[in-house]
Image: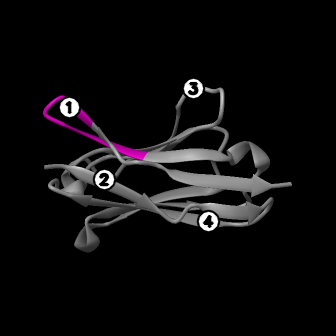
Amino acid sequence: QVRLVESGGGLVQAGGSLTLSCAASGIIMSSRTVGWYRQAPGKQRELVATITSVASGNRINYADSVKGRFTISRDNAKNAVYLQMNSLKPEDAGVYYCNTNLFGADFWGQGAQVTVSS
């Protein structure tokens, strides 16, 4: 059974930093493309960052709105993917989810709340 668990959310002042973790079980994260998404109240879920599998070169992409501020990475030994978020802005607030896909099935974590005070 595939399970993704996000952690590391919280309340931070604008300009501050947070690191989100996505721990996985039932799936080898290094073999999958993993994405971080976020959803603000009243808005659609949007893609923030992706990292391809190790075999595909760990290629990384970011949404324009977070380039230069966010960093996605993975720790294969811990079977986890991280999202380092720096210089946070109020518009970065929302619930952050990690996502991966296996054999055509999408898997999501429960989400981590990020609140940014101005």
105 inside magenta stretch: yes
* Residue holding disc 2: 4
Asked whether disc 3 touches disc 1, contact meaning CB atoms under 8 Å apart, the reply is no
Residue at the bottom extreme of this rendering: 77
Cα gap from disc 4 to disc 1, whole angstroms:
29 Å
Q: Is residue 58 left or right of residue 94?
A: left
Q: CA distance from mark 2 to mark 1?
A: 13 Å
Callout count: 4
Amino acid type of the residue tagged 2 in the rendering: Leu
Q: CA distance from mark 3 to mark 1?
A: 20 Å
Residue 9, placed above or below residue 66: below
Residue kind at label 3, given as amino acid type: Gln
Residue with the mark numbered 3: 44
> Residue 18's mark?
4
Residue at which label 1 appears: 105
Residue, x 74% and y 42% (percent of image)? 91
